[in-house]
Image (cartoon, coloured by chain):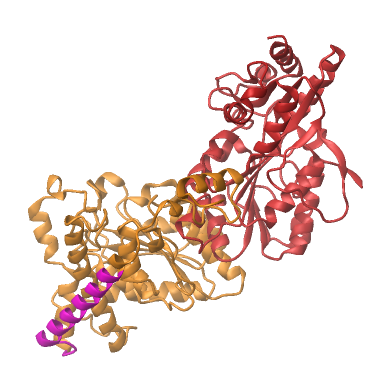
Amino acid sequence: VSTVSDPRSNEAPLCLLASDGTLAEGHAPALDDRELLSAWRAMLLSRAFDERCFSLQRQGRLGTFSTVHGEEAAVIGSAWALDPSRDWIVPQYRELPAMLHQGYTLTRFLQYFTGDPAGNFMPEGVNVLPFQISLAAQLPHAVGLAWGLRHQGSDAAVIAYFGDGASSEGDTHEAMNLAGLRRAPVVFLLKNNGWAISTPVAKQTAGLSFAARAAGYGFPGELVDGNDLFAVHDATHRAVERARAGEGPTLIEARTYRMGAHNTADDPTRYVDPAELERRRAADPIDRLRRYLLNRGLIDAGSETELAAELGQEIEVAVRASEGGPRPGPAALFAHVYATPPQRVRDQRSEATGEPG
Amino acid sequence: MAVMNMVEAIRSCLSDEMQRDERIMLLGQDIGVNGGVFRATEGLQERFGADRVVDMPLAEGVIIGSAVGLACSGLLPIPELQFLGFGSQAFHQIEGQVARMRFRSQGRYPMSMVIRAPFGGNVRTPEMHSDAHEAKYVNAAGLKILMPATARDAKGLLAEAIRDPDPVLFCEPLRGYRLIRDEVPEKDYTVPFGQARIAREGDDLVIVAWSAAVVIAEKAAELAAAEGYSVAVLDLRSLVPLDTDALREAVARCGRALVVHEATLTGGFGAEIVATIQQEAFWSLQAPIGRVTAPDTPYPIASVEEFYVPSVERVLAGVRAVIEA
């Protein structure tokens, strides 16, 4: 039984990995051991990077950002069901490990959150749209992208990430409705982490299940334990297969929990009950997977220490790389606004930069 | 040359461009079997198929929002807002996403798309259809905004918009769809952005207008001529880019200017024109610049819209007021 189900709902999420680290009997994971260990590495990297970024932010070396803390299985379990060479990710802003899987880098993330616009550039071959800040606006994009890829003969799938808060926006409804109509190869991955800043999910909707909404749009919805890497991966893998086969979209509600603050400017002690947070800590997705990997003998205490050191070094390399470059000047205001800028904008650029127009 | 009305010119352009460029997809409400509520896309679904001329659900936000994704996939969407008045339902996607995706992605995802939107009054539509909302889109940096006033320009500017890599809001005058008729070249041509058109020559005053207001301005100029005033009409064609040179030259020649637009006065694009003229041609001015616009009230129901939209009589009165000031 899941430890993260919504107390208001009696619907049981798909759970394959019990909190003691035992896998459901008879379940053969689609992830092989090599992929599983890379997912484990990504989870630890994400947690360590969150901590490092939090400290950089407190030192004034990084702007306001949001951690993934607590949602690692939901993000990584889903992203690991994609083939980065053809599939796409349409993120919100709390899915860094999924973006890394597609080829984005820690350095670019740090650049973006130190205020260098180059950080939002995805090089060719990195199939990721920019961070979305205006919540749910990315969902129509994901539908159009999936539809457009299919229109051009690709069998690619697109994962669109959003949350319980974004589910209240009109764009969520419009996007799902169109996805159903066009049978777009898109997976709507709703991370229900319980909070939209200080608004609990019970104040977001009177509905007891987000997954159930899919029926209204003519495609399947599935509720999964979002702290169970195997359950998230299994559901996403099936959804991606459906997408490739032309069977259309799927909505996956991954029930998880935001263990950190909304972002570095937020103080959750104002609204999160400490006893509740303590209970949620017991369902930490990393601890759960660790138990499984230890049971299987795929890791041991020594290998984890070694890995932690390696990840720490990787993070420091990225931090140094992100801090080394020149700071953007006023020309950055004008770069890539227009392909062919109006004269007025060219004049404004000259005035701001002192360079000829 | 063939004489076409504006809706025929637009349809002819869409057809030619779709033939030329396989990436083009049309999206909109009622644009397929029905050919669009104004028939701007009549026959195109039959010709190019339902995969390229797509009847969309009644949801402006996702008509524009999915066009963003289609553009990211390498296609060239031409979404239609059935009426610009309903563009507010998609404003967050146009202003927040379409206009700045190139900027936010540092050039990785250019938004090659043209948003077509009919607008403007005096055609007896129900409420909320006719508003001239162009000024609020001018604040969406990254967007180009076109306002054709002739059939020839509608075709040539639309072709240029489709071939331009930046996103374009292409506003079509409802009142002009069938009333505006002129000669349209049969060969392939485009009209470049940012070059205003001198619709009528004159020496005493220049009326600056765009879209259907140009027709009103021309009629008023004609009547003013009978009163002995030589009035020029400058058709801006595009608000972004703005032809500052043409404004400066017209005011330098005439010394007086009157701006006419269908939108409300305060914060309307006329304010930008007045500010630009005083910056560029202050010492040429012989009189304060006039404005004839809608009052600062919501677009009314049809029975009183003739009092709301600038009429020939009001524009003529505006001409007299500036010249006799």
Which of these two is toward me, A135 or B255?
B255
The residue at 36%/72% (across/down) is A79
Q: Position of residue B46 (x, y in %)?
A: 77, 58
The answer to which quarter of the image holds residue B224 is: top right
Which of these two is toward me, A83 or B317?
B317
Residue A97 appears left or right of A136:
left
Q: Is residue B33 visible?
A: no
Q: Position of residue A291 (x, y in %)?
A: 14, 80
* Image quarter (top left, top right, bottom left or bottom right) of the C terminus of chain B: top right
Residue B202 appears left or right of B240:
right
Q: Position of residue A321 (x, y in %)?
A: 30, 71
Chain coloured red in the rendered structure: B
Q: Is residue A303 inside the magenta stretch?
A: yes
Does the magenta stretch mainly form a helix, a strand or a loop? helix
Residue range of the region highlighted in magenta in the rendering: A297-321
Chain coloured orange in the rendered structure: A
Q: Position of residue B300 (x, y in %)?
A: 61, 21
Which of these two is toward me, B230 or A304?
B230
Q: In this picture, is B293 found above or below A24?
A: above
Q: Is residue B303 inside the magenta stretch?
A: no
